[in-house]
Structure formats: C-alpha cells, structure tokens
Image: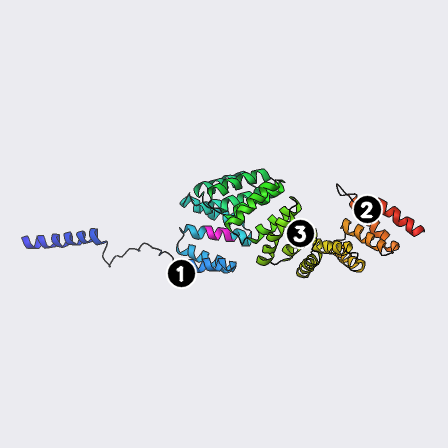
Amino acid sequence: AWIARWRPRDWRWRWWASVKRQGPPMMCPTKPKKVTAPPPPAALSRAQKLARSGKNRLAISAYEDLLKRDPDDVDAMVALAGLYFDVNQDAAPALKLLETALERVPDNWLAWTYRGIVTWSMGDRQQAIVAFRSASQFAPQQPRPYLDWARRLKSLGQIDEAVEVLETGSAAVEDNARLFYELGSCLKELKRYDDCARALRESLRIDPDFADAHVTLGAVLNDFLKRPAEALPHMDRAVQLKPNAISYHNRGVIRARLGDLEPAEEDFLAAVELDKAYVKALYNLGLLYHKQENWKKAVEIYRRAIEVKPEYAEAHCNLGHVLMRADKPQEALPHFERGHELGSKIAGWRYPSAEWIENCNRRLEE
C-alpha cells in the first residue's frame, strides 16, 4: 500500500520537475519563439557594391531584403534612406527610416547628416542646421557634414556662414583637400582673392593631382590677381589631369594674355571641339582672330557664338566692328543696333555702341 501511494507521487513529481526544467513535453507543444538570424556579411557587401556601381534600384531591393532579415540593422536603414532620397526623391520614407535609426543609435553621424539633407529639402532649415551641427559634433573628424552644410548655405547666398563652417571643418579634419577647395571657392565669391589663393594652394599641397583646384587657382591668379605667368603651370597641370573644354579654354586665355597667340588658338579650338556650344570659348577665339585682323575667320566664329547665344551683346558689337573693318557697313548696322539694345540693359556696359551706330550710319550715307 505504501509503495502504491509513493509511485504516483514520484511519477508526478518527476514529470513536474522536467516541465519546470525543460518546458512542456512534446505531447503539448507550444509555438517556439521566432529568432531572426543576422544577415550574412556577403549580403551587406553585395548591397554596398550595387550602390557604389550606380545600380541604385537593385541596391534598394538588396537593402530592403536586409531589413526584412534584421529590422534593427542601423547601417542598412541609413543607406536605404539615402537611396530613397537620392534616387526616388522620397523625403518622407527616408526621414522615417532615419528617425528610427537615430532612436536605436543616437550618435550615428551619417544618419544625422542625411537627416540634415532631407529636412533641408523639405524646407525645414532650422532642423537641418541642428542635424548638421549634431553630425559634426558626433564625428568632428568626418568632412562630409561640413561639406553638405556649407554647400546648402552657399546655395542660399549665405557665403559668410559657409566660410565659417568650412574653416571649422578644415581645422577639425586633418588634411582634407576638398574642404580647402570649397573654402577657396567661397572666398572667391566674397572677392577675397589672396585668401582664396592660399586655401587653394593648401588644397593642392594635400592633393597635388586635384584638377579642379588647379583650374580655379589658375583662373584666380590670371583674372583677378593679374599674375598669368604664375597661373600657366596650374592650367598646364589641369589640362594633363582633366582635359576638358574648361581647362583648355582657361589655358588659352592665359596664353593669349602672355602673347602666345598660336598656342592660345590651339587651346580655344580644342575647347570648341570638345564642347561645340561653349560660347565663351567661341567668343574668345573670335576675339583672337579679331586682334590678328583675320576678318573672315573672326566673322565666322562670332556668328557661331551668336547662334549659340543670340543675346550675347559683346559678340554682336564685335561682329559689327569686324564687318565694318571688312567694308560691310550694311551688314554691320543690325549687329551694332542689337548689341546696343542688349548692352544698355547691362550694368557697367563699356562698349561705345551708340557711337559705332552713328559711324556706321555716316558710312552708309557716304
């Protein structure tokens, strides 16, 4: 009797102990808790490679798959928000993702930077400035928050504020050529040409192969500081690094100022060949032929410049002047009149176009 009473109790006691230790037995199973495995590193690297190679739609799909596997992946959230905004111009879903990312990791500088970009595009300038400032505080050694912040201030015409941001960034970030280049560009707009040249030289000290810095420094030295001999080596290097229409044209301007007319003509022709609608190169090439008294070529090039830009007052006046020298006053008069009409609307118009019209009418009467 004692054994009969003890065995059921023993059995029940053992069963309850196993339930407490291991959970219910298989005859009454419960639904197991769903555990999501983190995405494999290969999936993340694939999404990043797609984004870098410009396959943005595929990159968006890859990042969305990553977030389905791991909804707490902050890096994927920030990258996907950037793609949403850059590719689809969808500010609302991008901002939502960024706010979620910042809830999880409040000191993520890239999320703060994107938040500044997105809120700026939505017109909330105050929130954008707060976001850019937060990004620069959380990652003072990162150049991107300063650059994005300064570019947006520059777009509003707030050049002094942009200079202040870039000076802070160039002091905080060690040896970043882009920060000094943007600083030089802003100083150029403020007409602080000596400071601009110093900033651009610092940019080139850090990165001697920075083609845009060579182009801008050469233009500042030639156009504003009147030092074409100093500017020419920078333009030569710019043509080597980035042989585009702008670099050829700027070198041609410097060579023409130094009196090297044949090399200048080659540069202008190269610029026009690369960009047939580059009206400034066409005008300067026409001006070169004008000075060489090559009337036929000057007329041809000036006409091409006017075809590209019909409201080009200087080209009209110069074409009229060349036609007068070629003894064609009847053809010159309409260009003088059109140039005078357009030039009278320009502040500081320096061409004596009214006098030229009188001279042309006198020649026609004779």
Q: Disc 2 vs disc 3: Cβ atoms closer than 8 Å?
A: no
Alpha-carbon span between mark 1 and mark 3: 53 Å
Callout 2: SS: helix
Residue identified by numbered label 1:
42
Assign the N terminus to one quadrant of the image.
Answer: bottom left
Instruction: Compare residues 136 and 261 and report the one nearer the observer.
Output: 261
Q: Tag 1: Cα neighbours inside 10 Å, few (<14), some, or many (≥20)?
A: few
- The residue lying toward the viewer, choosing from 131 and 144, is 144
> Disc 1 or 2, which lies upstream in sequence?
1
SS at badge 1 = helix
User: What distance separates the C-alpha of mark 2 from that of mark 3?
Assistant: 29 Å
Please name which of the two marks, 2 or 3, marks the residue nearer to the observer.
Answer: 3
Give, as a single range, the part of the protein colored magenta.
Answer: 78-83
Q: Amino acid at mark 3?
A: Ile
Gap between marks 1 and 2 measured at Cα? 67 Å
Magenta segment includes 80: yes
Which is more N-terminal, label 3 or label 2? 3
Is residue 280 left or right of 88 when viewed as pictured?
right
